[in-house]
Image: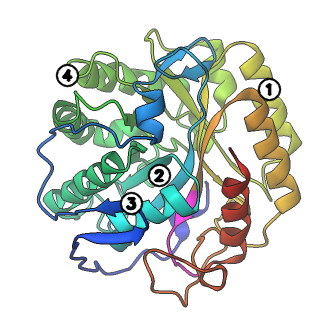
Amino acid sequence: MNAKKYRSLIIGFLSVAFLGITLFPGHTLAASAAPSSGTVSPAPDGSPLAAHGNLHVEGAFLVDCQGNPYQLRGMSTHGIAWFPQYVSPETFQTLRYDWNTNCIRLALYTDEYNGYCSGGNQEELKSLIKRGVDSATALGMYVIIDWHVLNDRDPNVHKEEALAFFREMSALYKDHQNVLYEICNEPNSGVSWDSIQSYAREVIPAIRANDSDAVVIVGTPTWSQDIDLAAAAPLEYDNILYALHFYAATHKDWLRQRLEACASQGLPIFVSEFGTCDASGNGGNDFGQASQWLQLLDRHQISYCCWNLANKAESSSVISPDCSKISGWNPEDLSESGKWIFEYFRSKT
């Protein structure tokens, strides 16, 4: 989203200690702050992962282990450097059982204040990613590791850091069935599809060297709106999804028409970020436009993640700025957009 880079991001780290917790009857998580070892435990009975297993791309669809189209629906965190408290088993448990979601996106900013490549503590940030993957895995949820390119504009700016990061993550999670990799969130400011392809042709093989069938999400030019350029010249790899992002008060019929045209051409699309407000992440919500968007995505069985899981004082944050709870939210704990998307997720079977 093109104005997100102008937001105030000076938010201190909050320390979060995790204990064994029971939030819902019959669903208990024993959490640990220890770094992930990459060990895979069986998915909980009845969980999305237990039912659908390893995902892959066939034609225009993300499909499950039985070859049936499968939609991921979930929340994206805000930058985990600034809102680490929501990267927790209790938060994800609320999203899984109360919100009826099956996916979480972990947004690791690269070039903003305390981002991974701009002064952030890389080991602490990787620990947050690992904590997020562990928490999602324990619940049988799918999880997206998002290399959140924004201020850097061209993903090639921090390509070497990206290569090292994805080599490490894919080596750690090569045996996980629930981890997807988003390698460049929103290339922008005139960055060409050729430049993004050049980057992807280095990063994807780095991931695939460890995880040969990993599902990879590739951002597209103009803040992940120009999926038509990807449709005209797709990458030569399998198990690739192309990112489209929309904000309902800004992106309307013209972008929906683009999505429909690309989907009809067989382009596999993932809406890895959307909001009900305008492209700044703020302003008024347009729930009518948001409904049109989500109905279209459901019709085409396209997966999506809502921006954002935080209590920041902006329209796109789903938690009220006055709420410090990290789980078990009541309606009064949610923002206007949070109440709406909560009800939408709950309506899905």
Which stretch appears magenta? 307-313
Q: Which sits in the foreground, 198 or 28?
A: 28
Name which of mark 2 and mark 3 comes first in the sequence: 3
Residue kind at label 3, given as amino acid type: His
What residue does disc 4 label? 210
Give the Cα separation between the discs numbered 2 and 3: 37 Å
Can you say which quadrant of the picture contains the C terminus?
top right
- Secondary element under disc 4, as helix, strand or loop, is loop
Name which of mark 4 and mark 2 comes first in the sequence: 2
Q: Residues within 10 Å of mark 1 (few under 14, many from 20)?
A: some
Does the stretch in magenta take in 261?
A: no
Disc ID at residue 27: 3
What residue does disc 2 label? 150
Name which of mark 3 and mark 4 comes first in the sequence: 3
Residue kind at label 2, given as amino acid type: Leu
Give residue 167's quadrant in the image.
top left
Name which of mark 1 and mark 2 comes first in the sequence: 2
Residue kind at label 1, given as amino acid type: Glu
Q: Residues within 10 Å of mark 4 (few under 14, many from 20)?
A: some
Give the Cα separation between the discs numbered 3 and 4: 33 Å
